[in-house]
Every structure is written in structure tokens, then in C-alpha cells.
Amino acid sequence: MCPAAPLPHASHVMSRIARPAVSAFAVLLLAQTVTAGPLRHGERDAELSVSAVGERTVRIALTPLDDKGKALISPASTALVELKPDTKFQVRELAEAKEVEVGKLKVRVKPNPLTVTVTGADGKVVQELVITEADGSVAFRTAAPVLGLGEGGVQFDRRGNLHRLLNGQVSPPQAPLATHGGTIISPFLIGTDGWALFFHRPFGEFDLRDDKGKFVPRKDTAGKEPLELFLTAIHEPADAMAEYYRLTGKPVMPPKWVMGYMQSHRTLAGPEEPIAIAKTFREKKLPCDAVIYLGTGYCPAGWNVGHGTFEFNPKTFPKPEESITALHDLNFRIVLHINQAPRNMFGTSIAEKSDSPTHIHNYWAKHAGLVKLHTDGWWPDDGDELPVEARLARHRCYYEGPLADEPNVRPWSLHRNGYSGVQRYGGWIWSGDVQSKWATLAAHVPVGVNHSLSLTPFWGTDIGGFVPTKEFTGELYVRWFQFAAFNPLFRSHGRTWKLRLPWGWGADDPGPIETNVKPDPAELKNAEVEPICKKYLELRYRLLPYNYTLMREACDTGLPPMRALWLHYPTDPTAVELGEEYLWGRDLLVAPVVAKGATERKLYLPEGDWYDFWTNEKPAGKREVTRKVDLATMPLYVRAGAILPLDPVRQYTAQTTDEPTTVRVYPGKDGEFRLYDDDGKSLDYAKGKFTWTRLKWDDKAKRLSIEPDGDAGFVIGERTFAVEVVGGGKPQTVKYAGKKVGVGFEK
């Protein structure tokens, strides 16, 4: 179950890990003739502890001692949830190698140099860590591709590069902001040969340039701050995700409207423009759920009066209550841009009382007027200068703050910065102020995949790129739009913002330019763009039941919607190394077109049979294929055995419809899909008010069964499914009311 993040008690804040007593265990002493000497951390004596955090995760800590022999207190951290490690081994002197069982693992510790070797039940080495006591650095094996490390940086396999202490809109020269986006280092690495490492403290950089990887802590931490890391043995790739979220906390469900399309605005011509644009979406039948308004400062006429302010701009929203009501009446959600958060923002609960204006309770109070107007979501921008704890506090503020005002309405916020743990408060992050280039689009495919493996499941980008360049054309916008339709966040934003509207390239006026680069007039009046955008908007909304199920799956298991092929094909070396294509959930393979003027896209299909989503052709897998493409086509493939639920097209996610949900079966293998439902807006899902429906395909019998999967805490009532089997004859309609039904097809 995926509970909503509760408002934590203040007692949870200091150290997230209690210091447990050493449990009884059998330690095997492997006799050696080494003189015992004190362990060291920098210039201080130190204590080494090895603890179990579950059956497959080991906590290893090297803690400096003060002059009285007491362990130094760890700095406050809210990156982890509260853990209760079971300490199996604790020592301050080490003359001989020692071995201890930790869960299903064996840990061997030996001195000179201090080495920790972890082996699995099969006797194979999971990982070997060599700790340099002088500075607390840690060397580790990197024999196979290494994934993770958060957002930005050189992609896809992280080996071969130095990943420095960077945050926000700064990037290494070989992976600049312009193409790779901002950098959000998450200290979580995944070795595709069966291990994962999370370095909780201290903060450091990762040098993966040599045959072995190395974690190098900040120089000022030696002898002052404990080294604390967690090593996980991975039996299945999903283990890595499950353990990461067990350490840092499970994600929370977004409101269902977040699954729809979001349209961002910048410089507004006047108070009539927001309503006019909203009405145009509805008149053109272009599905859209949310409108986002930038603040004044980054544009001359935004929703507020300037950076960091909470007052509406009288030139753009002279009667904000009337405007917001009118937008709500058109079934749009309102998201407002906020920046200039206090650099030292803090607070472990919105319910805490504090006299400091930088405490999250008092900072959130500044939003009161906007809350009363029923603002639906928040866009806390910037934050590069915020330390890790302030970043975590800011995410907490925009989750717990709205809940304090509306306790049973799911909050939502979109951030440019974060850290491990922000998923407990939503954790929606976009890649920053990138440039409108083909290289940017290409880089963002693996950027999104690595982010999803190691930071939060919920990622997105500015469709078209934020900063226009001479490469910004209708073609680039379309290709980016197609890609974003298969990102968790589906949102257009950027300078020269009217070209970010689905119909913008069809006009002869690009609107406010907001940059030194003007669009090529020959690129305007492009009638191809809007119909293609509509095609992918409608597909996104048809996939709503599939996508919403992926959100719940991310909360329950940690598996992100945007998945590396490694997660499902770990024994296929070609699939493991691929970052330029990805799986959308278990069943869809997405191969974005990232080259200008492309007429074909080469891609790899993993083992098994696959169906071309657009043509239903059925190529065999475990090989590279070349797919011909026109501008309207981004290659999508569906796994044989997949069951794909497809809703009728809506104009917004909450729109009611009497039309049935299509259940499309891709035969060739037995298959199963668990369809998730809840009310889409409240926290009741955390109280068991949801329902799972099992759709099961028997390929030999050519029969689909539909039945409840567990107790239904959320009652939907009777629903109609239109079942179709690709290549299998006439579709059939079946009514389902919570009891098992089936439908057969001719063999």
C-alpha cells in the first residue's frame, strides 16, 4: 500500500537512525597475526558498525570518536525515513578479519586497508568496499554498467566520468545545462550486475573514471562527520527500487488531473488572455487539465507583481477571484509560480510553531490568500542555492502546507531542485532551463531514465526546450511533444511561449519573443503541428487508466513509469546498456525520434514478440529493427501478452463519459494487467479506499477474464469494457460489476 506522507512528529527529525544495541550473534574470527590497532576516521579514532536493514540491505558506518571516546553525533538529516537497524558487528579495533551474517548476506571485514566484502547466499561477491581511513573515501567495484546518481551529468552508464558536487543550473562541461539540464546529485548508484549503494553521509562526489569507482567525501568532513552507507544485494532489478524507497520513503499518489496535459504561460497581454487561451483549448477540443502562470520578474507581465511576491498583478489579474473562477468553470486547474524561497528554510512539520520567518509553517502562511482562491498546484522555482535540508524542507512545505488547509485533498507541486526523500512529498521535478536543440532532446531520454531510477519516479521537461535557439522549429516541438506524452509530467513551457501552444506554430504571429533569437518566419503557418499534437494529447488521455495504474505501482513498488530496459530485461546485455529508448510501464516500449529530418528510427526490441502500436505488425524481438517514420509517428511497441486499457478521449481527466473502456489484448502469450482505481483526488486511498481489477488473458484458450483483485474499498459500480484482441476478430462488450466475468474469442 502507498500511504500518504503523514505530518511527522518532531521527534523524527534529528537522526533518522536510532543507535541500537549490538544483538547476539556468532562472529567467526579468522586468525591472523596482525597487531590490533584503533580504527581511524581522519585524525580521530573511530568505530565501525555493520547492521542489518532487512534481509538484503546492510548498513555500514565508520563514526569518529570524540576525545572522551564517545561517537560523534551525526548531523541532522531528513533524507531517510526512520529506520531501526539491527547491529550485528561493532568494533573500534580490528586485528583480524571477521565475518558475520547479516540477513541473507555474509559480511567479511578485514583491516589494512579496511575492507568490507559482502557475499550472497550463493557465495558470490555482491560488492567489496575499501575504505581509506585517512579521508573516509570508499572504493567499490564497477565491472558492469552503473546507473542512477540522480539528474543531469553524462549519460547513460555513469562509468568513465567524475560526478562532482554540483546542484541546480550548473553542470559539468561534458554534459552542460543547455543539453543535459540541471544537476541534482542523488547518492544512489545501481550496479547492473547485482548491487546498489546509497551514501547517506557525508555529502561527496563519485569518481567512476577508473576500473573501480570511488566515493570521495568533502575534505572538511574527515574525522568530523560519520561515513554512513547502505549496500543492497539485488536479486531482481525491482529490489533496487524497493530498497531505495524503503530507505528514503515511498512516493505519494498525485491527483489524477496531473496525468493530463499542462499549458504554461509567460508574458500575458492582459486579463482577457488567460481565459481566451483556455477557451481555445476547449473549442479546438485539445485536451488539457491545467494552466500554469509564471511570475513577474522572469517575464514583464506574469501573475504576480515580482519575484517572491504573493500579490496578483493588477495588469494581468485585476480581479483574480473572477478569473480563477472562470478558469475553474472551464475545468482547468490553476498552478502558480513561486520563487525566492529562504535559503535557510527549515522545519520538520508544518504544524510546528516557530518565531522564525524561514520556518515552513510561517513561510506557508504567506500563501493564505492564494489558498483561499483555490489555487490547485504550485511551481516552486529556482532553489539552486538551498542546502540539502532546505530543499527537503521546501518540498515538505508544499505538501504539508496544502494539507493543513485542505486535509483530504492531494497536493501537487513542481520543483527544479530536490534530493533523495522528496518523493514522500510528491517529488515532481523538471530538468531546468535547457536549450531548444536536437542534442537536448536526445540527451533527455537517458536523463529521464536515470532520474527515474535514483531520485523520484516523477520527472519531466519543458516541451521544446526552455531557451529558443535557431534549431527551435515546429519539427523539434512536435518530436519533443511526442516524447513528453510518455513522461510522467506532460507540460509545455519556455520563452517565446506562444509557440509552446499546440496551435502556436500554425499562426503567423509568434507572440512575445523574450529572447535574442527570433523564429524563422518560414517555420510559421505550419499546419502540420496542431493535428499531430492533438493526436498525442488524445493518446495520453486514452492511456489514463494505464498511466494512473503506473502511478500507484510507483508508490507501492518504487518502479517508475519511465523504466530502463534493465528493469525487465536484466540478462540481455544489449538492453541493459540502452538509455535512448525506454519502457513506459511493463508493456510499452518508447523510442523517441531525436534527429532532425528523420525518416527512420533504429531501435532494439528485447526478447519476445512485439506489436507495432500504430500498425499492429508483429516483429520478433532480441534484435535491432528499423522503423520508418513520418513527422506524426514516434515508434511505440507493445509486448505480446500485454493487456492495454484505453479510455475514450476526454477533454480533461475528470470529464465523465458513457463510452466504454477499451481493453486491447496483444496475443501471443498469456498476460495479466492489474487495473487500479480510486477517487483521484483525496487521501482516502491511504485508508484502503481503492480497488484493483485483474484482467487475465489465457492465450491458448483465447479467453479474457475480469475479476476483483482483493477487497474493493472503492466501489465504482457497473462498468462496460469493450474487449478487442489484435488480429482476433470482432470486438466484444462485457459488463463488469465486481464479480468475475469472462469473454472468449475464436481460436
Image (cartoon, grey):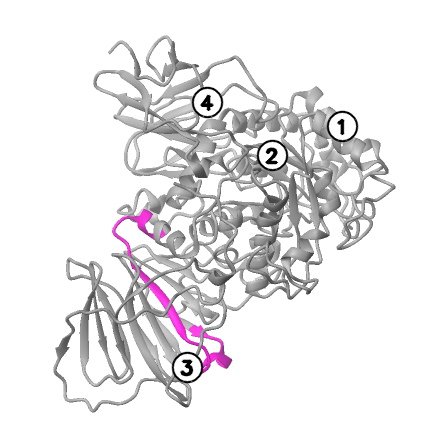
User: Residues under labels 3 and 2: Cα distance?
Assistant: 50 Å
Element assignment for label 1: helix
Farthest-out residue, front: 353
Residue flagged by tag 1: what amino acid is it?
Ala
User: Residues under labels 3 and 4: Cα distance?
Assistant: 56 Å
What mark, if any, has residue 478 been given in the picture?
2
> Which residue is nearer to you in this view: 401 or 128?
401
Q: Nearer the viewer, mark 1 or mark 2?
A: 1
Q: Is residue 133 magenta?
A: no
Q: Is residue 542 left or right of residue 148?
A: right
- Mark positioned earlier in the residue sequence (1 or 2): 1
Residue drawn where x is 74% and y is 34% of the image: 522
Quarter the N terminus occupies = top left
Write down the residue under mark 4.
646
- Mark positioned earlier in the residue sequence (3 or 4): 3
Q: Is residue 230 magenta?
A: yes
Quarter the C terminus occupies = top left
Element assignment for label 4: strand
> Which residue is nearer to you in this view: 405 or 667?
405
User: Residues under labels 3 and 1: Cα distance?
Assistant: 61 Å
Write down the residue under mark 3.
135
Element assignment for label 3: loop
